[in-house]
Image (cartoon, grey):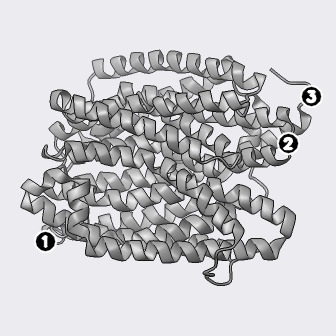
Amino acid sequence: MHSPDLSSAEGAEGRVAAKVGAVGAATLGSRLLAFLRDAGIAALLGAGPMADAYFAALQVPNLFRRLLAEGALNGAFVPLWLRLRDTQGRDAVRAFGEGALGLTAVVLGLSTLALIVAAPLVVHVIAPGFAADGERFAAAAQLVRLSAPYVVIAGCVAVLGALLNAEGRVGAVAFGPIAFNGVLIAAVASLLLGGPAVAAHAGPVLAIAIVVAGLAQTLLIGGAALRLPARPRRLRLSGGPELRRLLVLAGPGLLAGGIPQITLMAGAMIASPSPAAVSWLYYADRLYEFPLGVVSVAIATVMGPAIAGTVRSGSPTEIAVAQGRALSLALGLALPCAAGFVLLATPIARALFERGAFSPHDTAMVASALAALAFGLPGHVAEKVLGAISFAREDTQTPMTTALAGLATSSAGALALFPIFGHVGVAAAIAAGGYVAPALLAVVLARRGWLRIDRDAAIRIPRIALATLVMTAVVATARAAIEGSGVPTGPLGRFAVLLMLLAVGTAAYGALLGLFRVVRPAEIAAALRRPRG
């Protein structure tokens, strides 16, 4: 599996693996905090009318976060930054960064004001089924207004994060979500400890907490950006050629990056007439977002810039190595997570959410949606990698077009399946649509000669799939043995059982990756080594 002419590529692979390891550790910590946050929200709100209103309103800030902060803007920004820095120097890239920051602040500031003024219209769009329920509709409109300022905050965080990623400073960007979730957990804890009188105001308090959490994230990432050699000094309102080029590239890329959230929003729109369906889909999606978010952040902060760098200055062999490693790393996480979600959907939902206002019936509904969503995870992850390959060539139009095809497939499927299977049909349609976009994008990239993977990756990926199948059998056997011996019914007992099953799966998968020679010891050491800078 060693390629004799890839010594420099192997060194680059070690550096990328180290950064991915650091980013992955930070993102893992953030996602674990997000689970703790969502478990508290489930205990507070369950899946009742306020939960439906909160999760419907939350789709607006989540959409902007997905559009801006999870790779789309970064994918357009980094290649332009690198080219400008190499050809015109630090002063040029400083002006470029200041212009991007100023434009983002103005445009999204105006968008925030529009959301506040037009909140009822927004609710009619994102949850038309709420119109027949005055309580859910009024609550959702109030929560849209309270959370709207996060929109402009998300834009500034995205630009500052792109500056850091372009310079290879990935730490603050990776740890920013930890600060965000820490603030939200503090808000949830105060509501849970404040008693029923305080908990009655959970929706508005949580909406305001989103804005405060965004400010905390801005302070962390902004502080790191101010230490860059080409740090921004002010907001610049100008339209140079590079900034216009960013707009041309970022527009389609932003839409393509936001398609997963738009797909979920479309599903919630279709399911909104059914009480609690919006909440069930949200809880399932939060679990599903765990591996997808880890890969998205790793691609945005490490793998995407690495691919862009090799496209600019590397040989065809080095390009193939960078792209092959990105696809191997992404699928190496997505495949076992998808299998685990299908197999352990009920134990996961029960252990994390079933307490307080969240009932056993809610657990069953969330688990069924999660199992359906999980089938689409490998496709959505592959789309992230393929999109990064296209962005590295400064082509954002193609990922947008293929993503829209996936959205159309998911929406049509949801409309057809919801009357028959309810919210589970919506989840299944989202999963099916997750394979349309990457399949179309892969065909286009291959025809252009842009899709290249090295021999190592071509060998590793089938072995990763085989390791996943064997791991699934091991976990299924362990689950049957544990449940056959009597499962504790209390919250701690359920959580302990879930941890045991996850430990068995993780250990089995890791051992199988070594047995099948998917991962070499040197690569594990490189991933654990702290990255320079």
Q: Position of residue 273 (x, y in %)?
A: 13, 46
What residue sits 44% from the left and 25% below the top? 339
Q: Position of residue 298 (x, y in %)?
A: 61, 47
Determine which of the numbered discs, if any, sits on residue 89 in the image.
none
Compared with residue 526, is residue 44 higher up or lower down, i.e. above or below? below
Q: Is residue 217 left or right of residue 320?
A: left
Q: Nearer the viewer, mark 3 or mark 1?
A: 3
In this view, the residue in front, 516 or 65, is 65
Query: Where is mark 1, residue-wise?
Result: 197
Query: Where is mark 2, residue-wise?
Result: 314
What residue sits 57% from the left and 16% below the top? 466
In this view, the residue in front, 12 or 526, is 12
N-terminal of the pair, mark 3 or mark 1, is 3
N-terminal of the pair, mark 2 or mark 3, is 3
Secondary structure beneath dot 2 equals: loop
What residue sits 46% from the left and 59% below the top? 65
Q: Is residue 170 visible?
A: no
- Report, in whole angstroms, how far the alpha carbon at label 1 lies from the one at label 2: 62 Å
Compared with residue 426, is residue 396 higher up or lower down, i.e. above or below? below
Instruction: Please tell me in which quadrant of the rendered image residue 171 appears.
Output: bottom right
Secondary structure beneath dot 1 equals: helix
- Report, in whole angstroms, how far the alpha carbon at label 2 lies from the one at label 3: 14 Å
Q: Is residue 390 left or right of residue 475?
A: right
N-terminal of the pair, mark 1 or mark 2, is 1
In this view, the residue in front, 533 or 50, is 50
Q: Is residue 382 left or right of residue 213?
A: right
Query: Where is mark 3, residue-wise?
Result: 5
Q: Residues within 10 Å of mark 2 (few under 14, many from 20)?
A: some
Instruction: Please tell me in which quadrant of the rendered image residue 419 appears.
Output: top left
Q: Quadrant of the N terminus?
A: top right
Q: Quadrant of the C terminus?
A: bottom right
